[in-house]
Image: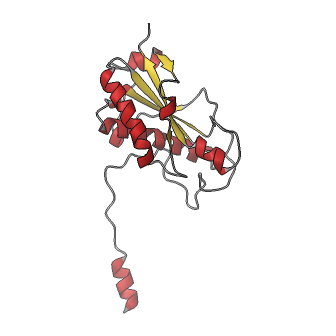
Amino acid sequence: MSVALLAGSSGCHRKPTGLTPIPYGERPPGGVGENQNVPSATPMPSENPVVSTSGPGGIPVDYTNGKWAQVLANGTPDRNKFSADTVYFDFDKATVKSSEESKLQDVAAYFKGNATDALIIEGNCDERGTEKYNLSLGERRALAIREYLANLGVDPQRIKTVTYGASKPVDPGHNEAAWSKNRRGDLVLMTPPK
């Protein structure tokens, strides 16, 4: 009797909706990501980031056409403007923490008052995990920030996301103090070309 009950209760579950698609497929069984103490594969060169073409909720974004393409492609980058607004993530997560929300509210307020500027979000990970998984996680982090900003009223076409995986650590250490600094989303202001 108990076998029949277990079999009956293990039916199909509804698939969640509204999720940002994860590039490169699902996490492999047994996982190799930030939660594994496995050295990463050869890091991807930092001059060759993976650029996301998904917008909030998986809506495609075209960075080659449109109003913001010129600013995103040829604008002047300012890495200092939002350096205090770097968004940090929990271990092996791509969800904006409540402690980071005020930073993004400040960024959204800036964009509401500066109609000509755009933003590049760079997703980063710590050194643990495979290159493939860390690139995916970095992208999900950048997309989570873009989605948060879009929900605050910033046009997602103004925001380009890239992932560097683990190839651009701010702290080269091999401990939690270093790793917590490397699990981040950097925000780069792009002003129109002169």
Colour basis: secondary structure
In which quadrant is the C terminus drawn? top left
> Is 100 situated above or below 109?
below
Foreground residue among 4 and 27: 27
> Is 167 situated above or below 17?
above
Q: Residue furthest left?
A: 153
> Is 12 situated above or below 43?
below
Q: Residue at x 63, y 56 (%)?
A: 36
- Residue 55 drawn at (x, y percent): 36, 36
Foreground residue among 100 and 18: 100
**Is 80 left or right of 4, judged from the image as shown?**
right
Q: Quadrant of residue 171?
A: top right
Q: Residue at x 46, y 43 (%)?
A: 140
Q: Residue furthest bottom?
A: 1
In which quadrant is the N terminus drawn? bottom left
- Residue 70 drawn at (x, y percent): 40, 15
Q: Residue at x 38, y 32 (%)?
A: 106
Q: Residue at x 47, y 28 (%)?
A: 82
- Residue 35 drawn at (x, y percent): 59, 56
Q: Quadrant of residue 29?
A: bottom right
Total count of labels = 0
Residue 94 visible to an observer of this rendering:
yes
Residue 54 visible to an observer of this rendering:
no
Foreground residue among 4 and 115: 115
